[in-house]
């Protein structure tokens, strides 16, 4: 006899914050319509972009800065219909130094929103659209890899200040948002995943399965855990007066 467990969804509240399980239907197969790409290592990007377009020609790519330039180069004359810069999409320019490009509600709503949730859809399609050229979208794929912190600190002569500026902020935030919301989005965090991803995409008739999204999410979570552990380990062994202060212009 097959037994089905039934229970009330988990809901936790505190102050003005509430945490609850997804109470909406989860879609198994989703099409790769909106793809957010923000990568340091651009290896294999050409094949990935073309492979996704082969499966879904109407796919649109959203990218910031240097990644966006690479995507536009790959797309060529099709960039006008298949690409939009993150800066144009959000309406917010980056801060000097390439900062806060992706730390925007339109980006993270598209990564975290639950499909079929009327409140989330109102937020994306109405609230975020107010006074803006673009409404929000559900991102179907996030492609991201991070500033190379571990390889930087392995180089001889690397200072604590060089290590500090190579801590990625937006990348881990988008990666964990995507991994958390594997109900809705696939998170690709390494060029080594691209070939298998495209093969499964083709086998599933140009759709991304829930199982595939879950498996990618577990890999994304592992990569972020290792990244953050490397950062805390490095800075945890530094002495402020010996390893940090000498490399700063302190008033």
Image (cartoon, rainbow, N blue to C red):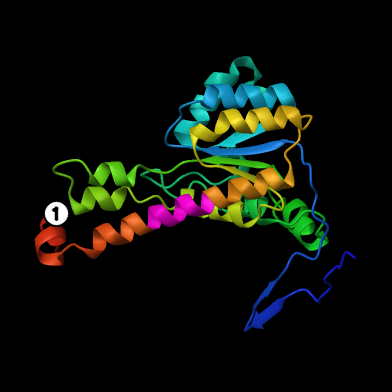
Hey, which quadrant is residue 29 in on the image? Answer: top right
Count how many numbered circles sit on residues in the image.
1
Instruction: Identify whether 165 is placed above or below 8.
Output: above
User: Which residue is at the far right?
Assistant: 1
149 and 7: which is toward the camera: 7
Is 246 left or right of 27, judged from the image as shown? left
Is residue 169 located in the magenta-colored stretch of the structure?
no
**Which residue is drawn at the image coordinates 57% and 31% (left, top)?**
194
**Residue 59 visible somewhere in the drawing:** no
User: Which residue is at the far bottom?
Assistant: 15
Is 195 left or right of 8, judged from the image as shown? left
**Which residue is drawn at the image coordinates 59% and 16% (left, top)?**
76
Instruction: Identify whether 228 is placed above or below 21.
Output: above
Hey, which quadrant is residue 203 in on the image? Answer: top right
Residue 2, x across and y down, in percent = 88, 64
Callout 1 secondary element: helix
**Which residue is drawn at the image coordinates 86% and 68% (left, top)?**
3
User: Which residue is at the far front?
Assistant: 1
The N terminus is located in which quarter? bottom right
**Residue 149 visible somewhere in the drawing:** yes
Query: Residue under circle 1?
Result: 247
The magenta span reads 220-228
Magenta region's main secondary structure?
A: helix
Is 237 left or right of 139, judged from the image as shown? left
Q: Residues within 10 Å of mark 1 (few under 14, many from 20)?
A: few
153 and 58: which is toward the camera: 153
Residue 104, x across and y down, in percent = 56, 53
Residue 57, x across and y down, in percent = 74, 24
33 and 68: which is toward the camera: 33
Residue 41, x across and y down, in percent = 42, 33
The C terminus is located in which quarter? bottom left
Is residue 223 located in the magenta-colored stretch of the structure?
yes
């Amino acid at each position: 006899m097959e037994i089905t467990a039934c229970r009330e969804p988990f809901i936790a509240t505190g102050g003005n914050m509430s945490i609850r399980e997804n109470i909406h239907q989860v879609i198994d197969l989703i099409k790769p319509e909106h793809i957010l790409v923000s990568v340091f290592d651009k290896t294999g990007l050409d094949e990935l972009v073309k492979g996704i377009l082969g499966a879904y020609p109407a796919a649109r790519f959203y990218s910031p800065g240097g990644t966006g330039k690479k995507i536009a180069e790959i797309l060529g004359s099709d960039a006008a219909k298949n690409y939009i810069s993150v800066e144009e999409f959000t309406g917010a320019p980056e801060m000097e130094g390439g900062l806060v490009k992706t730390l925007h509600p339109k980006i993270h709503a598209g990564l975290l929103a639950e499909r079929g949730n009327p409140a989330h859809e109102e937020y994306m399609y109405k609230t975020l659209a107010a006074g803006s050229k673009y409404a929000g979208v559900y991102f179907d794929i996030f492609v991201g890899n991070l500033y190379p912190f571990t390889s930087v600190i392995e180089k001889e002569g690397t200072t604590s200040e060089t290590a500090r500026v190579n801590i990625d902020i937006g990348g881990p935030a988008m990666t964990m948002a995507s991994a958390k919301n594997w109900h809705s989005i696939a998170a690709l965090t390494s060029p080594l995943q691209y070939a298998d991803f495209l093969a499964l995409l083709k086998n599933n008739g140009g759709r991304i399965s829930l199982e595939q999204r879950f498996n990618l999410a577990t890999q994304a979570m592992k990569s972020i855990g290792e990244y953050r552990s490397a950062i805390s380990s490095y800075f945890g062994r530094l002495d402020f007066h010996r390893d940090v202060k000498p490399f700063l212009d302190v008033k």
